[in-house]
Amino acid sequence: MTTRAAASEHPPTAAPADRKQPGVLYMLFATEAWERFSYYGMRAILVLYMVKALGFAEDRASLLYGVYQGLVYLTPLVGGYLADRVLGYRRAILLGGVIMAAGQFCLSTGAVHLFYAGLALLIAGNGFFKPNISTIVGTLYGEDDPRRDRGFTIFYMGINLGALLSPIVCGQLLGENPAFGFGWGFRAAGFGMIVGTLTFLVGQRWLGNRGLAPGERAGARDRRAPAPDASDATRPLTKVERGRVAALFVMVVFVVFFWMAFEQAGSTMTLFADRATDRDVFGFEAKASLFQAVNPVLILLLAPLVSLVWKALGAAGKEPSTPMKMALGLTFLGAGFVPLVIAASIAGTHGRASWVWLVLAYFLHTVGELCLSPIGLSLVTKLAPKKYASLLMGAWFLANVVGNFLVGLTGALYDTMTHAQFFALFLVSSLGAAAVLVSLLRPIRRLMAGVH
């Protein structure tokens, strides 16, 4: 990390000769990779555990999964606010990591009452961890730093490195392996959370003054950094700032439709993989949980390509705006349900469809995710007034809250209609949301007031 980048919590824009990413980004990459290993390892086996080990009915398991996922994305509002005003980002991240590790070990016991306690701890811990590590990444860049979007894409690859390994370890090798069982899958997820927390604990020294609590920030500020305006915390938002916050919330509405469909991966798509998919992959029997590794594999393969596409289009002056990228994300997501409709029609009531259809669906969903999710995180750090940075990062996750609650509600419909009809619902909702978003591009860009 350069001396200039360490001098201030919000460094100036990079000069043309300084296009390397800050070195500390890779520590945050590693921390997030281990935290996501923990989260996605648990998610890969959660519904299967409820149905096969705890004896829950499929509709109850889907509903509980959706409620859990929704609350996971609701608590960042509280965690982000406390980090902004009291704890600082660093303490919030460490606190969240410890709480989530405890939650994973509660799940591993097999006791129903500790199962619910474990979910509650994971929900609470995620609220402290999730918004604040993303916000720290945002502090590595100045307001107009061209490295920002690419930095968030690199960070997003860390998320998916963890998400790639966890279904293999926690699902295929441990959770769905009769020699070990679901308890060992959750223990492996807990161990991953411990490693991620220790990585951040050791590596935070490279953050300089970033992420400190408000009082510590004032006392530890580098003398070369300009003093913050003392009135900034109490002054009302300007008209431009209010417009940008409004643009953020407009886009949150459309992102709800994205996550409602995308997060079927951990619920009904996993049940479809388990019950209606021929999982013989060239002579190898893939467990249902293993298919959740397809998305992160594709993220790691495709993220550099997508980043290069945006870079090339930007150099040519043709890069789409962030709202347009999100409309493209919804379009690819909707297209990904076409293979699922076909597969469900082939499988019928009692048959099985080829695993190829499921992989094709994940491919299209992944392209859609890369168009929407990482640049969404970057956009929040651009549009949010600095004094509300973590709070509005938490607000961005409101889309995940509502979307995941809808995952639970729609998942309860999975066995009340044909599976082809069920997946067609998300084809229509995703493409419809994309069409409406395209029609609103101009007013949204006006509200963004020059932020690309």
Image: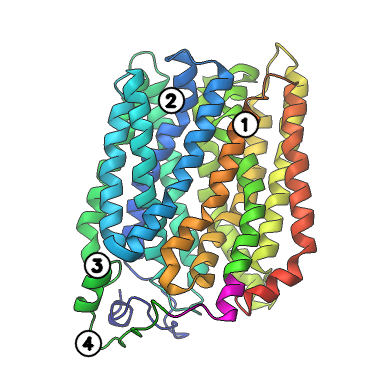
Per the rendered image, the range of residues in magenta is: 235-244
> Which residue type carries mark 4?
Arg
The quarter of the displayed image where residue 386 is located: bottom left
**Which label sits in the foreground, 4 or 1?**
1
Front position among marks 4 and 3: 4
Residue 172 is tagged as 2
- Which residue is found at the position 37% from the left and 83% from the top? 231
Q: CA distance from mark 2 to mark 1?
A: 28 Å
For label 3, the residue is 206
Report, in whole angstroms, how far the alpha carbon at label 3 lies from the one at label 1: 44 Å
Up/down of 383 relative to 351, above or below: below
Q: Position of residue 160 (x, y in %)?
A: 46, 47
Mark 4 vs 3, N-terminal side? 3
**Residue placed at 37% from the left, 27% from the top?**
116
Distance between the Cα atoms at labels 4 and 2?
53 Å
Label 4 sits on residue: 223
Q: Residues within 10 Å of mark 2 (few under 14, many from 20)?
A: many
Q: Secondary structure at mark 1?
A: helix
Instruction: Pinpoint residue 115: horizontal percent, then vertical percent.
Output: 36, 24
Comparing 354 with 163, the one in front is 163
| Quadrant assignment for the N terminus | bottom left
For disc 4, the neighbor class at 10 Å (few under 14, some 14 to 19, many from 20) is few
In what element is the residue under mark 4? Answer: loop
Is 240 a magenta residue? yes
Position of 134 relative to 270 (above/below) = below
Secondary structure beneath disc 2?
Answer: helix
- Under mark 1, the amino acid is Leu
Is tag 2's residue or tag 3's residue first in the polypeptide sequence? 2
